[in-house]
Image: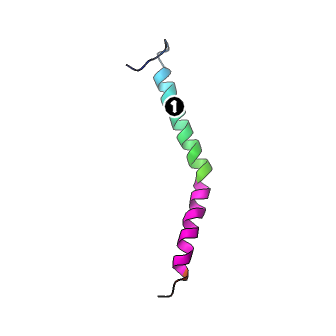
Amino acid sequence: MLAPQHDPFDTQKDMFMAWLGAMTAQLLLAGWHDRQLARLAAPAARRPS
């Protein structure tokens, strides 16, 4: 058993906070990631075939 610290829902709270952090990171970083991918794809589109 992980250290529940006298709270029967401590593990569930920890997992919820981990999920919340992951979702927040997805929302905050998704636009930046898309711009990075577009910048990588742009030179490939300009290459002659």
The answer to which quarter of the image holds residue 43 is bottom right
**What number of labels is visible?**
1
Residue in front for this viewpoint, 47 or 24: 47
Residue 1 shown left or right of residue 48 in the figure: left
Q: Is residue 5 above or below residue 18?
A: above
| Magenta residues (range) | 30-45
**Residue drawn 56% across the image and 38% down it:** 21
The type of residue carrying mark 1 is Phe
The 10 Å Cα crowd at callout 1, few under 14, some 14 to 19, many 20 or more, is few
The x, y position of residue 46, in whole percent, is 55, 82
Q: Does the stretch in magenta take in 10?
A: no
Q: Is residue 2 above or below residue 25?
A: above
Task: Indicate the quadrant containing the N terminus: top left, top right, bottom left or bottom right.
Answer: top left
Magenta: main secondary structure? helix
**Residue drawn 59% across the image and 43% down it:** 24
The x, y position of residue 36, in whole percent, is 58, 63
The residue tagged 1 is 16
Q: Is residue 14 above or below residue 24?
A: above
Q: Residue furthest left?
A: 1
The x, y position of residue 48, in whole percent, is 50, 87
Q: What colouring method underlies this structural image?
A: rainbow
Q: Is residue 2 above or below residue 21?
A: above
Dot 1: element: helix
Q: Residue furthest bottom?
A: 49
**Residue drawn 53% across the image and 72% down it:** 41
**Residue drawn 46% across the image and 16% down it:** 8
